Amino acid sequence: MELSELNPPPRLLLGPGPSNVHPRVYRAMLAPVIGYLDPAFLQLLSDTQVPLRAVFRTGNELTLPISGTGSLGMEAAIYNVVEEGDTVIVCINGFFGSRMADMARRCGARVVTVEADWGRAIEVEQVEAALRQHPGAKAVCIVHAETSTGVLQPLIDIARLCRERGALVIVDAVTSLSGAPLEVDAWGLDVVYSATQKCLSAPPGMAPITFGPRAVEAMQRRREPCRSWYVDLTMLREYYGGPRRYHHTPPMSMLYALREALRLVLEEGLEERIARHRRHASALWAGLEAMGLRLHVEDESLRAPPLTTVRVPEGVDEARLRQDLLERHGIEIGAGFGPLAGKVWRVGLMGYSSQPQNVLALLHALEVELWRQGCEVPRGAGVEAAARVLASGDA
Ligand SMILES: *Cc1c(COP(=O)(O)O)cnc(C)c1O
């Protein structure tokens, strides 16, 4: 048997991730693979930790890329901190909060959940009540940008509260890193992880993570070893720094990709990059609303610029519309799931995908496909409204 030539179709990736990979990142991945103990590779590893700290806005020494996707970053965060018998508070207002709870349970923790509807933020009072009921709680887990709902969770007050009560804050910043404001040190976040394929616009495969001093202390006080061998930081840190002892072979090509992606962030400027995500999301929101569509997260201040949830209008076949966007326009958007299944579409404007022409292309394609299904949205109104926001430059 012969395999045909590899030929994935060109796609505009406007879903919940991955985002389109920047051409310079692809180019970096062609660099030759070298040994994991080659001084040149070790230097490259160290070099990459410096911009990672800049992007996380932290001075944390223990800041490194985990070899795996965002979910492995989540495991690294939770498995290193949480032990059998610990009480852990997990905030759940979407899909990824539930995944954090699942992982904490697998570590043998007693999990206390604090919940909000999919599309709403967790209130600081809820966390306060949970901490009052469980004063010995070791950690609070929370998602910054919930990719399943489009909510950007305010973290400052919750983090401050956790510090006062002696609980660690573990934050999922998979979709927010370099796409929304995130201040690891200034906000006092203890463990924060992300992934390469969302706003960093590299392929999936690496999970940047950072551990603050309180988290390092908690790891040093562990009664039993981390239940995951692969993400055990006591071993990983001896390869990423210190004695450079072999642990696993890091995917070199992915490290090259991450390095180039970080170089692109620094060139653009972190603040400008975050402002770009905000500007293009605002244009998208204005366009969708001008078409008469409704955004699922009503409070604009709680919307995550990298991911927008838009309600499916009455009478529209949501799966068919997504399929037509993909097949007729080459555009991928995401479906809703859990309680939002069939009710929303998820539109990502992440990293390299967050560009003005992509906003306009999507709004136009959406209009065409809605009409084909008999949903007569005002002609041209979406593109017009978005273009106005893009031109005003003050979004
Ligand atoms: C995508 C995502 C993850 C999981 O990352 P994978 O790379 O798919 O393993 C975790 N949390 C959030 C908020 C995400 O959006």
Image (tube, rainbow, N blue to C red):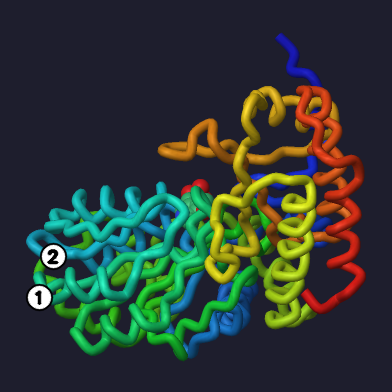
Along the line of sight, the residue nearer the viewer: 289 or 223: 289
Type of the residue with mark 1: Gly
- Vertical placement of 204 versus 387: above or below? above
Where residue 136 is drawn, which disc sits there? 1
- Vertical placement of 105 versus 244: above or below? above
Residue at left offset 69%, top offset 58%: 350
Type of the residue with mark 2: Thr
- Local secondary structure at mark 1: loop
Mark closer to the chain start, 2 or 1: 2
Graded by Cα atoms within 10 Å as few (under 14), some (14 to 19) or many (20 or more), the crowding at tag 2 reads many
Residue at left offset 38%, top offset 55%: 93
Alpha carbons under labels 2 and 1: distance apart: 7 Å
Where residue 160 is drawn, which disc sits there? none
Residue contact at pointers 2 and 1, CB within 8 angstroms: yes
- Seen in the image, is 51 located left or right of residue 3? left
Along the line of sight, the residue nearer the viewer: 128 or 28: 128
User: Residue 123 is drawn in which quadrant?
Assistant: bottom left
Graded by Cα atoms within 10 Å as few (under 14), some (14 to 19) or many (20 or more), the crowding at tag 1 reads some
Where residue 87 is drawn, which disc sits there? 2
Q: Position of residue 179 (x, y in %)?
A: 64, 68
